[in-house]
């Protein structure tokens, strides 16, 4: 049968349409890969933030909004430190995803910065290989140089002043300029930005207007006290004028030489220093807000995972201490807030995570293979509501002063802290029920109620004490802790 021109054209048109449909079916919609903004502040207790302590007068609206739109991890910790610069091993653990006693030598010996095989298994290197554009800004020093240099763009400097150029605004400027450069060249590769700050670590020279807001001054005279002000933050509930026994680190800088504080623990000094801390923390909030606003203007905010945390907590008067070299909750715990595509909003979950779980979690969220060197655990299932916790037991160390130092273990509501320092001159045990005594009050706080103190010497809890002692030793052995405390029996004693 002969086909006329009109029929031929009709059949040809149908074939083209069908072919086009099949072609379109073969092209699945490409999902845009997520971006990452990892925000790390230096020396911040979670309890400074209203997110964790509603009574705090610190105003951080950007961080609070981030929490309301994302997920708050209630129980996040750094694992600890084997030296006085707690920042250093903490940042090694973040970068490598490895436990405290399995880190490169530079975690313990800051000057030992020779290349190490783990350098290439750290955050920057991992995300570079996965096709991400990586950028970093943070403080210099007390960090992990071998990991820091893996980022493609690096703008590091320690900025602890009270001006745009000398303070936290400098770090936000680096990120804003980086994002601006991406915009100019219409960069399509996803980004990983390590957005670090040098504050609120001392010296806490806040901006003049924020120091005024919190009634604080940059006090520099060792022979006088800073002025009192009604604007200053109130003392923390677990404030003490002195810790009841020596922490075991002679001439520790954080306890003796912080500018504006030194060895003073009186109310005026502590409240002024809290005001300085809050001034620096609110400025961080302001700078974070600038970056989030830029991401929104670029249309990237909804496709960006934002992680907010700190390298460790801080005392500033709590328990009569000033620094980060202890294992009370205000110092051992860190803030952890995460928002991103597909994650629930306004959620709080227990978590039981370490900072060393960050790398595997970021890989999991990005769909990147987790390096075999990683020892941490992804808490993506916690973020997605499949689990409440990553692990049942948490173990912590401070081994920066006299050895063996301090150890802690926590399970459910119970927490044990042990001190073995000063060549055996200080040997103390503390047992707390955190459900009943979340501030870890000790007898010097003079609180009423059987549970609002150290329970280690209470005969009612002798069985619980024995259980926690055994659990601590098991955790020390499991994590290859090279030391043993005075009352522990083990073949691995150092």
Image (cartoon, helix red, strand yellow):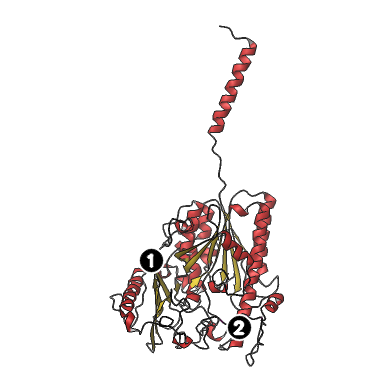
451 above or below 105? below
Where is residue 429, by image quadrant? bottom left
- The disc, 2 or 1, on the residue closer to the chain's N-terminal end is 2
Alpha-carbon neighbours of circle 2 within 10 Å: few (<14), some, or many (≥20)? many
Q: In the image shown, does 128 or 246 lie closer to the viewer?
A: 246
Residue 112 seen by the camera: no
Q: Main secondary structure of the magenta part?
A: loop
- The residues colored magenta run 231-235
Instruction: Find disc 1 in the rendering and name its residue.
Output: 392
Residue 386 part of the magenta segment:
no
Task: Please indicate, yes or no, whether residue 25 appears anywhere in the rendered image.
Answer: yes
The mark found on residue 271 in the picture is 2
Provide residue 275's location: percent of width, then percent of height: 63, 79
Who's the residue at 63% across and 66% down the image? 61
Task: Check contact, mark 2 vs mark 1: CB within 8 A.
Answer: no
Give the quarter of the figure containing the C terminus.
bottom left
Tell me the residue at 36%/77% (across/down).
Answer: 483
Residue 213 is left or right of residue 322, and the answer is right
Left or right: residue 216 compared with residue 100: right
Q: Residue at x 62, y 17 (%)?
A: 10
Q: Position of residue 120 (x, y in %)?
A: 48, 59
Quadrant in which the N terminus appears? top right
Secondary element under disc 1, as helix, strand or loop, is loop
Number of numbered callouts drawn: 2
**From the viewer's perspective, is 427 left or right of 185?**
left
x, y (%) of residue 292? 64, 59
């Amino acid at each position: 049968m002969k086909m006329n021109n009109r029929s031929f054209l009709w059949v040809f048109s149908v074939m083209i349409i069908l072919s086009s449909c099949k072609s379109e079916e073969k092209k699945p919609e490409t999902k845009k890969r997520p971006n990452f903004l990892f925000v790390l502040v230096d020396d911040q207790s979670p309890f400074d933030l209203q997110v964790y302590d509603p009574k705090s007068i610190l105003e951080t609206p950007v961080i609070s909004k981030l929490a309301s739109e994302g997920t708050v991890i209630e129980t996040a910790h750094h694992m600890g430190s084997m030296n006085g610069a707690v920042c250093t091993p903490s940042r090694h653990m973040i970068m490598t995803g490895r436990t405290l006693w399995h880190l490169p030598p530079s975690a313990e010996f800051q000057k030992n910065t020779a290349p190490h095989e783990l350098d290439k298994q750290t955050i920057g290197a991992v995300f570079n290989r996965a096709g991400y554009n990586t950028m970093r800004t943070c403080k210099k020093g007390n960090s992990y140089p071998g990991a820091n240099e893996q980022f493609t763009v690096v703008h590091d400097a320690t900025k602890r002043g009270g001006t745009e150029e000398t303070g936290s605004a400098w770090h936000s400027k680096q990120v804003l300029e980086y994002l601006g450069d991406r915009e100019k060249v219409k960069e399509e590769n996803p980004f990983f930005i390590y957005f670090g700050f040098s504050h609120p670590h001392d010296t806490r020279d806040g901006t003049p207007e924020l120091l005024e807001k919190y009634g604080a001054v940059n006090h520099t005279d060792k022979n006088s006290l800073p002025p009192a002000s009604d604007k200053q933050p109130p003392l923390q509930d677990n404030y003490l004028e002195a810790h009841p026994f020596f922490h075991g680190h002679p001439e520790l800088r954080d306890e003796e030489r912080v500018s504006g504080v030194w060895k003073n623990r009186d109310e005026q000094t502590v409240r002024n220093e809290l005001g300085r801390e809050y001034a620096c923390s609110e400025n961080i909030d302001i700078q974070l807000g600038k970056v989030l606003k830029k991401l929104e203007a670029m249309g990237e905010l909804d496709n960006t995972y934002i992680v907010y945390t700190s390298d460790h907590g801080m005392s500033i008067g709590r328990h009569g201490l000033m620094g980060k070299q202890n294992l009370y909750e205000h110092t051992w715990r860190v803030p952890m807030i995460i928002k991103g595509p597909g994650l629930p909003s306004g959620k709080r979950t227990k978590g039981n995570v370490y900072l060393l779980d960050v790398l595997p979690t970021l890989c999991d969220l990005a769909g990147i293979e987790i390096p075999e060197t990683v020892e941490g655990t992804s808490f993506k299932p916690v973020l997605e509501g499949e689990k409440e916790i990553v692990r049942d037991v948490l173990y912590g160390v401070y081994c920066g002063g006299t050895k063996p130092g301090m150890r802690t273990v926590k399970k459910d509501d119970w927490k044990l802290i042990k001190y073995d320092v000063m060549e055996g001159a200080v040997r103390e045990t503390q047992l707390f029920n955190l459900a009943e005594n979340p501030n870890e009050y000790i007898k010097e706080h003079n609180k009423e109620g059987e549970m609002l103190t150290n329970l280690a010497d209470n005969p009612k809890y002798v069985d619980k004490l024995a259980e926690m002692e055994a659990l601590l030793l098991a955790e020390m052995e499991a994590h290859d802790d090279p030391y043993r405390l005075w009352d522990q029996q083990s073949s691995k004693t150092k």
